[in-house]
Image (cartoon, rainbow, N blue to C red):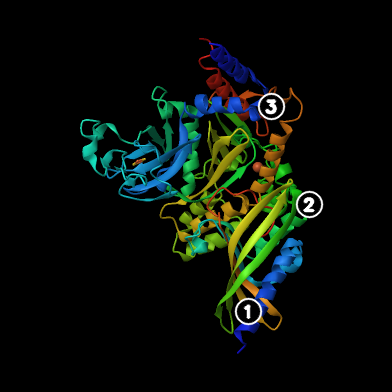
Amino acid sequence: MKSNTELLAQVTEFIGYEADLLDHKGYQEWLSLWTDSGLYIVPADLNETDYLNTLNLALDDADMRRMRVARLENGESVSALSVGNTVRMMSRVRVLEAGDDVVIARCAMTLNELRHGKLVTYPANVEYTLKPTSDGFKLEQKVVKLLHADGFLRTVSFIF
Amino acid sequence: MSELIEMQNISLKAAEMVEEGRVHKDLYSNPEIFEEELDKVFNNTWVFVGHESEVPEAGSFKTAYIGRQPVILSRDRKMNLHVLQNRCRHRGATVCEARKGKTKAFTCPYHGWGYGLDGSLRALPKPEEYDGVFDKNDMPLESLRVETYQGMVFATFNDGIEPLEDFLGGAKKWIDLFMKQGGGYPVKVLGEHRFNFPGNWKIQLENTTDAYHFPIVHKSFVSSLDEATADIFDFLDGEGFVEDLGNGHSVMVMIPQLVDLEEDLDQPIPERFASLAQALRDEGKSEDEVKKLVRAAHGTGFNLNLFPNVSCSMAFFRVLRPVSVGETEIQHVALGGEGAPTAFNRKRMRLHEHFQGPMGFGTPDDGEAWERVQKGAMAGTDGWILVNRGMNNLHESKDGNVAGAVCSETGMRGAYRQYKKMMAAGEEK
Ligand code: FES
Ligand SMILES: [Fe+2]
């Protein structure tokens, strides 16, 4: 049994690594972080947890993640081309559940996007369901709960 | 007096900025024209405020806007619908801030006046101080005229205009067709996406009848599809058309084989719906019902534009709200079937997420194009926006309306004709 500090350090490192990949558009490597059954979810309704039976802003299985990345990378999307950069801060990491097969953690994120010279900010709670493997953690589920999920958002051409 | 003349000049100007085939770019950027639009268009015609399924039970409500004005759509105990101004009759606070919900009453947070679901003022603290001042019965939340068609709820501040059904006119037939996508179940709202863009509302109004942009702006979406599905979206050379339905409404048929979802039910199930079909069989549906549901899952092959603020857009409602001359809020309302199989409604939501909303594969690229139009409106002092595409290639539709090619700007011209008429109203005086 790992000490809590060790697990927290590993989870924090993974979260930082994933965030770094996304800010630096390392999308292919990001895709490889997932299990085949993994789900990337950005809910529209923060009161709902039955994501499959609810309308979300995004609910991506492996196919949708691949297509989402392809869209951002293939140079055909005018909005993806005009996104400047994103810088996201991940903090307040807390391990909620530490099993041998699954680790659940939650953290705070502030994502800043520069878009047509204007700064747009997205504060969110992010929940990770991680699968420990011999290769390190794999993402089984990532739920990005935007603070203004049910407000009127700007359009998004990056990955939270 | 001089103020009056000035006002008249502005209104003359706005109406004159619309010609058959082109509109002046100032219509997107002049804040005075925007104020006039709220007054002459949004406060003066039938505006879509929601679908009946959003307020399914006695006590259900949702909040909405008509132009800049906050309203509440509610259902009272007798199941009647009301659209109420969201403004307490005492000192004017909004009485409801929730997006939707169920309640017995709307209680003002400031001094506690309580209103019924029909808007009537029911109770207030320490009423004796109003003895002889006013009668409670004279102080309901102000209500608007409400009428519905096929579950779509419209309201208007103008008591003098024609009934809703007359206003919808030639669009009614298309609403009937649109509502077949419940697959044999009543159409129901499943949820909604909300986003805004820094641009004028008319840019969105035009877009839902703009097939011309699709293969360009949505190239990255089409590339992400399998070949068979991508073919369906390759409709510019097909048999589609845009038909002007009058009163600013129009329909753009992109995929003619998906106009009537209750026809052609014996077609084989397309590959991309194979897993849906299997899931429906697993839920115990007969093969006939499976075919009907799978066909309905597509949504319809047309966009029906209803002036001024809603489009029945293939599989969902696209609702616009003008916030300011350079800002517009948009809702993409996902639809499914009331009581329909779980697999059907799930598929409908996944398809909606794929293209719609702020994170869909379509919307962000639309938003980018619209933002550019708004920016472009600032270039030069005397620029015009062209809406003359296909003007020389018109024909008469089966219903006797003017129609043009699927990628013509026939629908935009229809909308602007109505806009011009409304903006010019009262000028002759
Ligand atoms: S403002 Fe509503 S009770 Fe006073
Ligand atoms: Fe579009």
Q: Quadrant of residue B416?
A: top right
Q: Which mark is residue A75?
A: 2
Marks 3/1: CA distance?
57 Å
Q: Is residue B305 left or right of residue B168?
A: right
Quick one: B127 or A132, which is closer to the camera? B127
Q: Is residue B68 visible?
A: yes
Q: Which mark is residue B89?
A: none
| Nearer the camera: disc 3 or disc 2 | 3
Is B308 drawn above or below residue B318 in the view shown?
above
Type of residue at label 1? Leu
Image point 49% across, 56% down: which residue? B345
The picture places residue B282, in percent across and down from the top left corner, at: 48, 66
Q: Is residue B357 left or right of residue B338?
A: right
| Nearer the camera: disc 1 or disc 2 | 1
Report if the CB atoms under discs 3 and 2 are less than 8 Å apart.
Answer: no
Type of residue at label 3? Lys
Q: Which mark is residue B25?
A: 3
The picture places residue B425, in percent across and down from the top left corner, at: 52, 17
The picture places residue B53, in percent across and down from the top left corner, at: 41, 47
Image point 46% across, 41% down: which residue? B64
The picture places residue A116, in percent across and down from the top left corner, at: 73, 45
Quick one: A134 or B377, which is closer to the camera? B377
Is A20 drawn above or below residue A68 in the view shown?
below
